[in-house]
Image (spheres, helix red, strand yellow):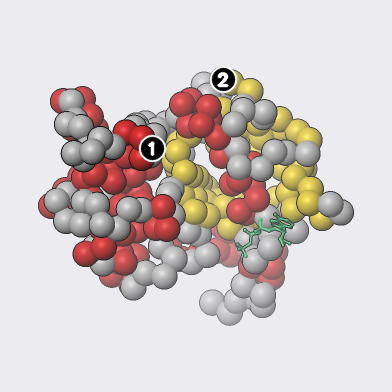
Amino acid sequence: MSEPILILTDVVVAFHALRAVDGIRLAVPRGQRRAIIGPNGAGKTTLFNAIAGAVPPSSGRIRFDGHDITRLPPHRRAQLGISRTFQITNLFPTLRVYDNMVLALRGRSWRKFSLFGLPDTDSAETASIAAALAAARLGERADIPVKELSYGEQRQLEIALSLVTSPTMLLLDEPAAGLSPSERSMVADIIRALDRSITVVLIEHDMDLALAIVDFVTCMFEGRILVEEEPDRIRRNAKVQEVYLGKPRHA
Ligand SMILES: Nc1ncnc2c1ncn2[C@@H]1O[C@H](COP(=O)(O)OP(=O)(O)OP(=O)(O)O)[C@@H](O)[C@H]1O
């Protein structure tokens, strides 16, 4: 069996006295869809930040695809294949969907603009953009200014932007937050249909949605891993019900 694509060994992230992430050991096999769940303040976002390079671990090691990335800055991790969803606030609303994709592909730099707009894309770039838009079910919306997209479509665009660089691991931070039921099922379909060459790790507050998408679940509580199990078992786990739902669930 090949080495897991992501391995965390005793990772601690401390903010002064608070250990937001408190000795996490995690191994995510290649191609797996993994949910990180847990109640507010459990440490999920901090863990994501440590994996993506947005906060440095206080101690412990992070290994990705055979590389020790513990001390690498975010852009180096991105070059190795880690992609995190952009938040809507990072979109350029007056530009077309396609142009936002070009910026994401080229490192999102305004310097790449010329006075006359974006330079033409080459065929490899065009193909990457088309594939990412199709995977996020936005293939028909390439020419629309972002500000004319619905909120749900903007969330889809976040996924498309994170796919355009052909990552090997996608970190999705609450991909369905704020969406209507039909938009949520669209996002679930998009994630389920992603190529298995992409490992997916997601944080999601909607437990039903998360459990419907993933193969395996890590439940955090107070910075630590409380339980790791398959979705079917996690639903019935009394410890998870107690901390995550706040009260025992009566089936
Ligand atoms: N930059 C920071 N400085 C100080 N404390 C922080 C910082 N970031 C997070 N924390 C604290 O670390 C703990 C874990 O927060 P984190 O946001 O990782 O939890 P979470 O599981 O993502 O919560 P939520 O589900 O509410 O987003 C919380 O007590 C939070 O207040």
Helix, strand or loop at disc 1? loop
* Residue denoted by label 1: 109
Residue at mark 2: C-beta within 8 A of ligand 1? no
* Residue denoted by label 2: 66
What's under tag 1, amino acid-wise? Ser
What's under tag 2, amino acid-wise? Gly
Q: Give me the residue at 47% from left, 43% from top.
A: 84
Q: Position of residue 27 (x, y in %)?
A: 61, 35
Q: Nearer the viewer, residue 152 or 217?
A: 152
Quarter residue 168 falls in: top left
Quadrant of the displayed image that contains ligand 1: bottom right
Residue 43 located left or right of residue 125: right
Residue 240 located left or right of residue 103: right
Any mark on residue 212, and which?
none
Quarter residue 54 falls in: top right
- How crowded is the residue under tag 1: few (<14 C-alpha within 10 Å), some, or many (20+)? few
Q: Quadrant of the C terminus?
A: bottom right
Q: Nearer the viewer, residue 90 or 68?
A: 90
Q: Nearer the viewer, residue 110 or 69?
A: 110
Q: Give me the residue at 37% from left, 69% from top.
A: 179
